Image (spheres, rainbow, N blue to C red):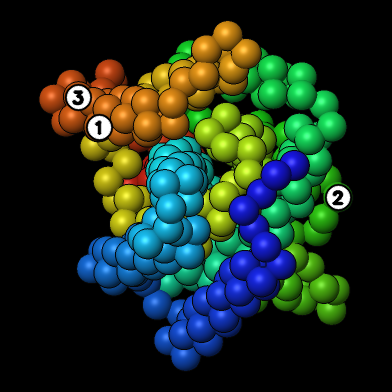
Amino acid sequence: MMSIGTPVMWMLFSAFVVVALLVDFLAMNKQGAHKVSMAEAAVWSLIWVAVSFVFVSLLWWHLGGMGGDEAARGMANGKALEFVTGYLVEKALAVDNIFVFLLVFTYFAVPGEYQKRVLMYGILGALVLRALMIFGGAWLIARFDWVLYLFGAFLVFTGIKMWWAAGQEPDLESNPALKWIRRHMRISPDLDGEKFFTRIGGAKVATPLFVVILLIGIVDVVFAVDSIPAIFAITTDPFIVLTSNVFAILGLRAMYFLLAGMHEKFHLLSYGLAIVLILIGGKMLLVDIYHVPVAWSLVATVVVLAATMVLSLYIPAKGYTGSAYPFKTKHGEERDGTKRQD
Protein backbone atom coordinates (compact mmCIF):
# COMPACT_ATOMS: atom_id res chain seq x y z
CA MET A 1 0.00 0.00 0.00
CA MET A 2 1.32 3.41 -1.00
CA SER A 3 2.24 5.74 1.86
CA ILE A 4 3.99 9.07 2.23
CA GLY A 5 5.73 7.77 5.35
CA THR A 6 9.46 7.26 4.86
CA PRO A 7 11.59 5.39 7.42
CA VAL A 8 12.88 8.73 8.73
CA MET A 9 9.34 10.10 9.11
CA TRP A 10 8.22 6.96 10.98
CA MET A 11 11.26 7.18 13.28
CA LEU A 12 10.75 10.88 14.04
CA PHE A 13 7.05 10.39 14.73
CA SER A 14 7.71 7.38 16.99
CA ALA A 15 10.36 9.35 18.89
CA PHE A 16 7.92 12.21 19.39
CA VAL A 17 5.24 9.89 20.81
CA VAL A 18 7.72 8.26 23.20
CA VAL A 19 8.97 11.66 24.44
CA ALA A 20 5.41 12.95 24.84
CA LEU A 21 4.43 9.92 26.92
CA LEU A 22 7.58 10.16 29.07
CA VAL A 23 6.93 13.86 29.77
CA ASP A 24 3.31 13.04 30.63
CA PHE A 25 4.30 10.22 33.00
CA LEU A 26 6.98 12.33 34.70
CA ALA A 27 4.60 15.26 35.13
CA MET A 28 1.93 12.93 36.54
CA ASN A 29 4.33 11.38 39.06
CA LYS A 30 5.60 14.80 40.12
CA GLN A 31 2.08 16.17 40.66
CA GLY A 32 0.86 13.08 42.46
CA ALA A 33 -2.80 12.26 42.85
CA HIS A 34 -4.94 15.33 42.31
CA LYS A 35 -8.27 16.19 40.74
CA VAL A 36 -7.84 17.83 37.34
CA SER A 37 -9.64 21.17 37.18
CA MET A 38 -11.64 22.39 34.21
CA ALA A 39 -9.06 25.14 33.61
CA GLU A 40 -6.16 22.66 33.61
CA ALA A 41 -8.05 20.34 31.26
CA ALA A 42 -8.83 23.25 28.92
CA VAL A 43 -5.18 24.31 28.78
CA TRP A 44 -3.94 20.80 28.01
CA SER A 45 -6.68 20.28 25.42
CA LEU A 46 -5.59 23.44 23.62
CA ILE A 47 -1.95 22.36 23.84
CA TRP A 48 -2.65 18.96 22.24
CA VAL A 49 -4.80 20.51 19.50
CA ALA A 50 -2.06 23.06 18.82
CA VAL A 51 0.61 20.33 18.69
CA SER A 52 -1.53 18.35 16.24
CA PHE A 53 -1.86 21.32 13.90
CA VAL A 54 1.83 22.12 14.19
CA PHE A 55 2.50 18.54 13.11
CA VAL A 56 0.21 18.72 10.07
CA SER A 57 1.72 22.10 9.15
CA LEU A 58 5.22 20.62 9.22
CA LEU A 59 3.99 17.64 7.22
CA TRP A 60 2.42 19.98 4.64
CA TRP A 61 5.66 21.96 4.39
CA HIS A 62 7.79 18.79 4.12
CA LEU A 63 5.65 17.43 1.27
CA GLY A 64 6.13 20.60 -0.74
CA GLY A 65 3.14 22.67 0.26
CA MET A 66 5.37 25.73 0.17
CA GLY A 67 7.89 26.12 -2.62
CA GLY A 68 7.15 22.83 -4.34
CA ASP A 69 5.88 22.33 -7.87
CA GLU A 70 2.17 22.05 -8.65
CA ALA A 71 2.09 18.27 -8.16
CA ALA A 72 3.87 18.51 -4.80
CA ARG A 73 1.55 21.26 -3.60
CA GLY A 74 -1.47 19.23 -4.64
CA MET A 75 -0.26 16.17 -2.74
CA ALA A 76 0.67 18.25 0.32
CA ASN A 77 -2.75 19.90 0.39
CA GLY A 78 -4.49 16.55 -0.05
CA LYS A 79 -2.56 14.78 2.72
CA ALA A 80 -3.00 17.71 5.11
CA LEU A 81 -6.75 17.67 4.47
CA GLU A 82 -6.87 13.91 5.02
CA PHE A 83 -5.06 14.31 8.35
CA VAL A 84 -7.36 17.11 9.58
CA THR A 85 -10.50 15.22 8.53
CA GLY A 86 -9.30 11.98 10.12
CA TYR A 87 -8.25 13.80 13.27
CA LEU A 88 -11.65 15.48 13.57
CA VAL A 89 -13.54 12.22 13.01
CA GLU A 90 -11.43 10.44 15.62
CA LYS A 91 -11.91 13.30 18.09
CA ALA A 92 -15.66 13.24 17.52
CA LEU A 93 -15.95 9.48 17.97
CA ALA A 94 -13.81 9.73 21.11
CA VAL A 95 -16.63 11.68 22.75
CA ASP A 96 -18.59 8.44 23.11
CA ASN A 97 -15.52 6.89 24.76
CA ILE A 98 -15.49 9.74 27.24
CA PHE A 99 -19.11 9.25 28.26
CA VAL A 100 -18.52 5.54 28.81
CA PHE A 101 -15.36 6.30 30.80
CA LEU A 102 -17.51 8.54 32.99
CA LEU A 103 -19.99 5.71 33.46
CA VAL A 104 -17.23 3.30 34.55
CA PHE A 105 -15.62 5.78 36.95
CA THR A 106 -18.98 6.60 38.51
CA TYR A 107 -20.02 2.97 38.83
CA PHE A 108 -16.84 2.12 40.75
CA ALA A 109 -16.90 5.42 42.67
CA VAL A 110 -13.36 6.32 41.57
CA PRO A 111 -12.36 9.69 43.09
CA GLY A 112 -11.37 12.42 40.66
CA GLU A 113 -7.78 12.49 41.92
CA TYR A 114 -7.24 8.85 40.83
CA GLN A 115 -8.86 9.11 37.41
CA LYS A 116 -5.88 10.78 35.77
CA ARG A 117 -3.56 7.83 36.47
CA VAL A 118 -6.11 5.30 35.19
CA LEU A 119 -6.63 7.25 31.96
CA MET A 120 -2.88 7.52 31.40
CA TYR A 121 -2.47 3.75 31.43
CA GLY A 122 -5.62 3.39 29.35
CA ILE A 123 -4.20 5.75 26.71
CA LEU A 124 -0.91 3.84 26.63
CA GLY A 125 -2.76 0.60 25.98
CA ALA A 126 -4.95 2.28 23.37
CA LEU A 127 -1.92 3.48 21.42
CA VAL A 128 -0.47 -0.02 21.19
CA LEU A 129 -3.77 -1.73 20.34
CA ARG A 130 -4.77 0.84 17.73
CA ALA A 131 -1.38 0.69 16.05
CA LEU A 132 -1.74 -3.07 15.69
CA MET A 133 -5.31 -2.73 14.38
CA ILE A 134 -4.34 -0.01 11.89
CA PHE A 135 -1.45 -1.97 10.43
CA GLY A 136 -3.66 -5.06 10.32
CA GLY A 137 -6.40 -3.11 8.53
CA ALA A 138 -3.91 -1.61 6.07
CA TRP A 139 -2.53 -5.08 5.32
CA LEU A 140 -6.04 -6.43 4.64
CA ILE A 141 -7.01 -3.52 2.38
CA ALA A 142 -3.76 -3.80 0.42
CA ARG A 143 -4.47 -7.45 -0.37
CA PHE A 144 -8.26 -7.57 -0.50
CA ASP A 145 -9.98 -4.50 -1.95
CA TRP A 146 -13.42 -5.83 -1.02
CA VAL A 147 -12.57 -5.35 2.68
CA LEU A 148 -13.48 -1.68 2.20
CA TYR A 149 -17.06 -2.76 1.44
CA LEU A 150 -17.15 -4.79 4.66
CA PHE A 151 -15.87 -1.77 6.60
CA GLY A 152 -18.50 0.43 4.97
CA ALA A 153 -21.37 -1.97 5.68
CA PHE A 154 -20.17 -2.37 9.25
CA LEU A 155 -20.08 1.41 9.79
CA VAL A 156 -23.61 1.83 8.41
CA PHE A 157 -24.83 -1.00 10.67
CA THR A 158 -23.01 0.50 13.68
CA GLY A 159 -24.41 3.95 12.95
CA ILE A 160 -27.98 2.62 12.82
CA LYS A 161 -27.40 0.65 16.01
CA MET A 162 -25.94 3.73 17.73
CA TRP A 163 -28.97 5.79 16.65
CA TRP A 164 -31.43 3.35 18.21
CA ALA A 165 -29.33 2.99 21.38
CA ALA A 166 -28.91 6.77 21.86
CA GLY A 167 -30.66 8.02 24.97
CA GLN A 168 -31.11 4.57 26.50
CA GLU A 169 -29.98 3.99 30.07
CA PRO A 170 -26.62 2.15 30.22
CA ASP A 171 -26.48 -1.01 32.30
CA LEU A 172 -22.91 -1.72 33.38
CA GLU A 173 -24.02 -4.31 35.91
CA SER A 174 -24.97 -6.74 33.13
CA ASN A 175 -21.91 -5.98 31.00
CA PRO A 176 -20.42 -9.32 29.79
CA ALA A 177 -16.82 -8.13 30.24
CA LEU A 178 -17.44 -7.10 33.86
CA LYS A 179 -19.18 -10.40 34.59
CA TRP A 180 -16.24 -12.34 33.12
CA ILE A 181 -13.71 -10.35 35.17
CA ARG A 182 -15.66 -10.97 38.37
CA ARG A 183 -15.81 -14.70 37.69
CA HIS A 184 -12.08 -15.06 36.99
CA MET A 185 -10.50 -12.56 39.36
CA ARG A 186 -10.58 -11.89 43.09
CA ILE A 187 -11.44 -8.24 43.63
CA SER A 188 -11.26 -6.23 46.83
CA PRO A 189 -14.50 -4.47 47.83
CA ASP A 190 -12.81 -1.07 48.21
CA LEU A 191 -10.07 1.03 46.66
CA ASP A 192 -6.60 1.10 48.20
CA GLY A 193 -5.37 4.52 47.09
CA GLU A 194 -3.90 4.36 43.58
CA LYS A 195 -2.84 0.73 43.98
CA PHE A 196 -3.93 -1.80 41.39
CA PHE A 197 -3.39 -4.75 43.76
CA THR A 198 -3.68 -5.11 47.53
CA ARG A 199 -3.69 -7.86 50.13
CA ILE A 200 -6.67 -9.23 52.03
CA GLY A 201 -5.97 -11.90 54.63
CA GLY A 202 -2.50 -12.41 53.18
CA ALA A 203 -3.81 -13.04 49.66
CA LYS A 204 -3.04 -10.72 46.77
CA VAL A 205 -6.21 -9.42 45.11
CA ALA A 206 -7.02 -6.83 42.45
CA THR A 207 -8.50 -3.50 43.47
CA PRO A 208 -11.50 -1.93 41.70
CA LEU A 209 -9.01 0.49 40.11
CA PHE A 210 -7.40 -2.39 38.20
CA VAL A 211 -10.83 -3.55 37.02
CA VAL A 212 -11.51 -0.01 35.80
CA ILE A 213 -8.29 -0.08 33.71
CA LEU A 214 -9.32 -3.41 32.16
CA LEU A 215 -12.80 -2.10 31.32
CA ILE A 216 -11.44 1.12 29.82
CA GLY A 217 -9.08 -0.94 27.67
CA ILE A 218 -11.97 -3.11 26.49
CA VAL A 219 -14.09 -0.03 25.80
CA ASP A 220 -11.34 1.47 23.65
CA VAL A 221 -10.99 -1.72 21.62
CA VAL A 222 -14.74 -1.77 21.01
CA PHE A 223 -14.77 1.85 19.89
CA ALA A 224 -11.63 1.35 17.80
CA VAL A 225 -13.52 -1.25 15.78
CA ASP A 226 -15.79 1.64 14.70
CA SER A 227 -13.33 4.50 14.45
CA ILE A 228 -10.50 2.81 12.55
CA PRO A 229 -12.69 1.70 9.60
CA ALA A 230 -14.10 5.25 9.62
CA ILE A 231 -10.72 6.82 9.03
CA PHE A 232 -9.88 4.25 6.33
CA ALA A 233 -12.86 5.72 4.48
CA ILE A 234 -10.99 9.04 4.43
CA THR A 235 -7.53 7.75 3.55
CA THR A 236 -5.81 4.39 3.18
CA ASP A 237 -2.35 5.86 3.80
CA PRO A 238 -1.12 4.07 6.97
CA PHE A 239 0.99 7.07 7.99
CA ILE A 240 -1.97 9.47 7.92
CA VAL A 241 -4.29 6.93 9.55
CA LEU A 242 -1.90 6.23 12.44
CA THR A 243 -0.73 9.80 13.06
CA SER A 244 -4.24 11.26 13.10
CA ASN A 245 -5.34 8.46 15.46
CA VAL A 246 -2.39 8.92 17.78
CA PHE A 247 -2.78 12.70 18.04
CA ALA A 248 -6.49 12.28 18.78
CA ILE A 249 -5.72 9.75 21.53
CA LEU A 250 -2.92 11.80 23.11
CA GLY A 251 -5.42 14.56 23.83
CA LEU A 252 -8.11 12.17 25.04
CA ARG A 253 -7.32 12.44 28.76
CA ALA A 254 -7.51 16.24 28.80
CA MET A 255 -10.69 16.10 26.71
CA TYR A 256 -12.24 13.71 29.22
CA PHE A 257 -11.80 16.12 32.13
CA LEU A 258 -13.00 18.98 29.95
CA LEU A 259 -16.20 17.26 28.79
CA ALA A 260 -17.04 14.93 31.69
CA GLY A 261 -18.93 17.68 33.48
CA MET A 262 -20.76 18.76 30.34
CA HIS A 263 -22.10 15.41 29.08
CA GLU A 264 -25.71 16.18 29.99
CA LYS A 265 -25.66 19.36 27.88
CA PHE A 266 -24.95 17.46 24.66
CA HIS A 267 -27.45 14.60 24.99
CA LEU A 268 -28.13 14.60 21.21
CA LEU A 269 -24.48 14.20 20.25
CA SER A 270 -24.80 10.41 19.99
CA TYR A 271 -27.35 10.92 17.22
CA GLY A 272 -24.86 13.15 15.40
CA LEU A 273 -22.11 10.54 15.75
CA ALA A 274 -24.49 7.90 14.39
CA ILE A 275 -25.18 10.07 11.32
CA VAL A 276 -21.44 10.61 10.79
CA LEU A 277 -20.79 6.84 10.88
CA ILE A 278 -23.62 6.20 8.40
CA LEU A 279 -22.33 8.91 6.03
CA ILE A 280 -18.75 7.61 6.20
CA GLY A 281 -19.93 4.03 5.73
CA GLY A 282 -21.99 5.11 2.72
CA LYS A 283 -18.90 6.84 1.29
CA MET A 284 -17.00 3.55 1.46
CA LEU A 285 -19.83 1.58 -0.16
CA LEU A 286 -19.98 4.07 -3.05
CA VAL A 287 -16.22 4.20 -3.59
CA ASP A 288 -16.40 2.52 -7.04
CA ILE A 289 -19.48 4.48 -8.13
CA TYR A 290 -18.66 7.97 -6.94
CA HIS A 291 -15.60 9.27 -5.07
CA VAL A 292 -16.74 11.65 -2.36
CA PRO A 293 -14.06 14.34 -1.90
CA VAL A 294 -12.34 14.41 1.47
CA ALA A 295 -13.32 18.09 1.87
CA TRP A 296 -17.00 17.09 1.69
CA SER A 297 -16.43 14.51 4.45
CA LEU A 298 -14.84 17.20 6.60
CA VAL A 299 -17.67 19.69 6.02
CA ALA A 300 -20.38 17.08 6.61
CA THR A 301 -18.77 15.95 9.88
CA VAL A 302 -18.43 19.51 11.18
CA VAL A 303 -21.99 20.48 10.19
CA VAL A 304 -23.63 17.37 11.67
CA LEU A 305 -21.75 17.54 14.99
CA ALA A 306 -22.22 21.30 15.35
CA ALA A 307 -25.95 20.97 14.59
CA THR A 308 -26.52 18.23 17.19
CA MET A 309 -24.55 20.14 19.84
CA VAL A 310 -26.55 23.31 19.22
CA LEU A 311 -29.86 21.42 19.19
CA SER A 312 -28.88 19.77 22.49
CA LEU A 313 -28.85 23.21 24.11
CA TYR A 314 -32.39 23.98 22.95
CA ILE A 315 -34.13 20.60 23.10
CA PRO A 316 -34.42 19.17 26.64
CA ALA A 317 -33.57 15.53 27.13
CA LYS A 318 -36.56 13.23 27.64
CA GLY A 319 -36.91 12.25 31.27
CA TYR A 320 -33.82 14.23 32.23
CA THR A 321 -33.33 14.18 36.01
CA GLY A 322 -30.00 15.92 36.33
CA SER A 323 -27.87 13.01 35.18
CA ALA A 324 -27.30 11.50 31.78
CA TYR A 325 -26.46 8.19 33.50
CA PRO A 326 -29.02 7.35 36.21
CA PHE A 327 -27.40 4.11 37.33
CA LYS A 328 -26.18 2.64 40.58
CA THR A 329 -22.60 2.79 41.71
CA LYS A 330 -21.10 -0.40 43.11
CA HIS A 331 -22.18 0.84 46.54
CA GLY A 332 -25.82 1.01 45.43
CA GLU A 333 -25.95 4.79 45.32
CA GLU A 334 -26.99 7.20 42.60
CA ARG A 335 -24.41 9.42 40.93
CA ASP A 336 -25.49 12.34 43.08
CA GLY A 337 -24.91 10.26 46.23
CA THR A 338 -28.56 9.66 47.11
CA LYS A 339 -29.88 6.16 47.67
CA ARG A 340 -32.13 4.60 45.09
CA GLN A 341 -35.65 3.72 46.17
CA ASP A 342 -36.05 0.20 44.78
| Snapshot quadrant of residue 325 | top left
The answer to whether 310 is drawn above or below residue 59 in the figure is above
- Name the spot of residue 135 as percent of width and height, x first: 75, 48
On the picture, is 202 further left or further right than 23? Answer: right
Quadrant for the N terminus, please: top right
On the picture, is 166 further left or further right than 229? Answer: left
Q: Looking at this rendering, what residue extends furthest in the top direction? A: 289
Name the secondary structure under disc 2: helix
Q: Nearer the viewer, mark 1 or mark 2?
A: 1
C-alpha span from label 1 to label 2: 44 Å
Residue 96 shows up from this direction: no
For label 3, count other residues whose C-alpha is less than 10 Å away and answer few (under 14), some (14-19) or many (20+): some
Q: Nearer the viewer, mark 2 or mark 3?
A: 3
Say which residue label 2 marks.
Answer: 184
Name the secondary structure under disc 1: helix
Question: Between disc 1 and disc 3, whose residue precedes?
Answer: 1
Between residue 121 and residue 226, name the one nearer to us. 226
Name the secondary structure under disc 3: helix
Say which residue label 3 marks.
Answer: 311
C-alpha span from label 1 to label 3: 9 Å
Q: Are marks 1 and 2 in contact (CB under 8 Å)?
A: no
Q: Residue at 18% of width from left, 30% of height from top?
A: 310
Residue type for callout 1: Ala
For label 2, count other residues whose C-alpha is less than 10 Å away and answer few (under 14), some (14-19) or many (20+): few
Residue type for callout 2: His
Q: Nearer the viewer, mark 1 or mark 3?
A: 1
Say which residue label 1 marks.
Answer: 306
C-alpha span from label 2 to label 3: 44 Å
Q: Looking at this rendering, what residue extends furthest in the left direction? A: 314
- Name the spot of residue 244 as percent of width and height, x first: 52, 52
Question: Between disc 2 and disc 3, whose residue precedes?
Answer: 2
